[in-house]
Amino acid sequence: MANTPDQATCLTADEGGGELLPLSPFYALRYHFGMLLGVDDFETEQAYHRAKMCLHNAWLHREGVVWGFGVSLDQQHGEIRVASGLALDAAGHELHLEADACVNIGEWFDKHEKDPGFTVKTEGDSKTFDAHVVIRFKTCLTRQVPALLEPCDNANTGTAYSRVFETVEILLLPNLSPPRVYPYHRLRLLFGLDEPKKKEGSTEITDADKAVLDELGNIQKLPREQQTAAYLKAFHRFAALDEIDLKPATSEDSARTLLFPGRDDDAVVIADIAGIKLTRQNNGWALAGGAVDTAVRPSHVATSALQDLLAASLNRAGSQNAALGPRVDPASVTISDTEIILKFDRPLHPKSVKADAFAVTVFDKTTGWKSFAIADPPALSDAGKTVKLTLTASPLAKGLARVIVRGTGETPLLGNDPLLPIAGAVTDAPAPQGIDFVLMKERS
């Protein structure tokens, strides 16, 4: 094959492989008529366009698998197999593997058993351990062609590599992969994806995270129809602060600020393999088990799929928010000997608040169910959000009390705006056409 590399000339990123394909996103070639072009000019031209693409990949997409890179265990041959695929790393490199690759797990274990920090459990002739698979950028020189040597060599001819082949290095590393650190922490906290951070040496939440949680609390107190706009405003606020905090990575010795959020040699995790079990067989090892987990990898989903998913989620959100009547907070319900108080999350239409929209019964183990009449009309307060039911025959009996607020039937309770029947409890599934609220509580 034309792109088959000379393995002796392959370099990983940490060995300077990136230098074979230099990057310079802010330094471009300017052509003019009659310009004499040399090697440096062509390298500058390629470095500019390559770097622009890497800059886009690294900052706007981050690291992640685009397709493929399946990981499987081949117990018959004692191997871990990685399928072909395409991914991006934190430095914007495109990581491409043309064909499946594999590693003999027994041979790997013999080389790494004594690695510092590698946790291995021994039971008789068996060894059990965890590992993870990563990929990272690698370049190779290939296709030698005749070339003129430097003038000092009396214009002799020789050969030089004329192609750079981009591929990946696949590594199996001891133990499970470390937890992934995600950017945009404030936004992830706002939408419930991250836990708040604590101040160093304290259980107190950091000031930055407290600001997010306070804003989230304020949004959740708003009427449902106002929350979408409030979330959007909070999104813009915290996105700006998260972006201000973003910084490019530095070199390993911290002497240089790099172009990208990660270094050239940063690897991409593609799988954890838990509970790898090797059993001694003759002079080697047999692979007896293990569980592959690819959920730990970062994955890139195509924008066309994201559009469909977003449209579906907005449709569900719309049905939950815009087309729901009032709902009862079960924790707000109080039951005494003479009255029952219920609080709704949205105002009720006063003309629908009638005694026949409610039912109160108590179950006695000896006599069974007994109904209790309600004075009509029930009292409405708190701008139509609180209903007080007064019992005409009191006190309310002891036993298992059942309170029903009707969102179904011929005369359900209705919301004031829009005129929709109540949708049960705030913890119930969405019910745009109404659902009864039911509460059962033991009275002793």
Image (spheres, rainbow, N blue to C red):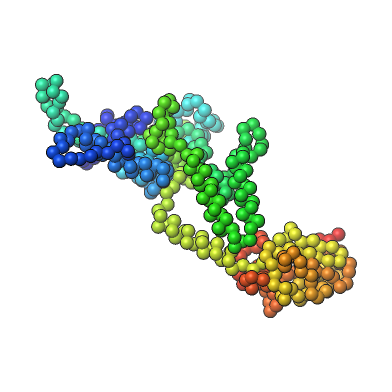
**Which residue is more in the foreground, 226 or 50?**
226
Quadrant containing the C terminus is bottom right
Q: Is residue 359 above or below residue 71?
A: below
- Location of residue 144 (image quadrant): top left
Where's the N terminus, which quadrant? top left
Q: For residue 176, say whether it is visible.
A: no
Tell how many labels.
0
Q: Position of residue 131 (x, y in %)?
A: 48, 36
Residue 27 in which image quadrant: top left
> Looking at the picture, how far across and down is residue 80, in whole percent?
41, 39
Q: Is residue 98 left or right of residue 380?
A: left
The residue at the point 62 percent across, 71 percent down is 418
Q: Please state which of residues 361 and 32 is positioned toward the viewer in this rendering.
A: 32
* Residue at position x 62%, y 43% in the image: 210
Give x and y (percent) for residue 148: 13, 28
Residue lying farthest to the front in this orientation: 32
Q: Residue at x 49, y 41 (%)?
A: 244
Residue 14 visible somewhere in the drawing: yes
- Name the residue furthest bottom: 410
User: Is 177 placed above or below 217 here?
Assistant: above
Foreground residue among 317 and 116: 317
**Residue 185 x %, y %:** 53, 43
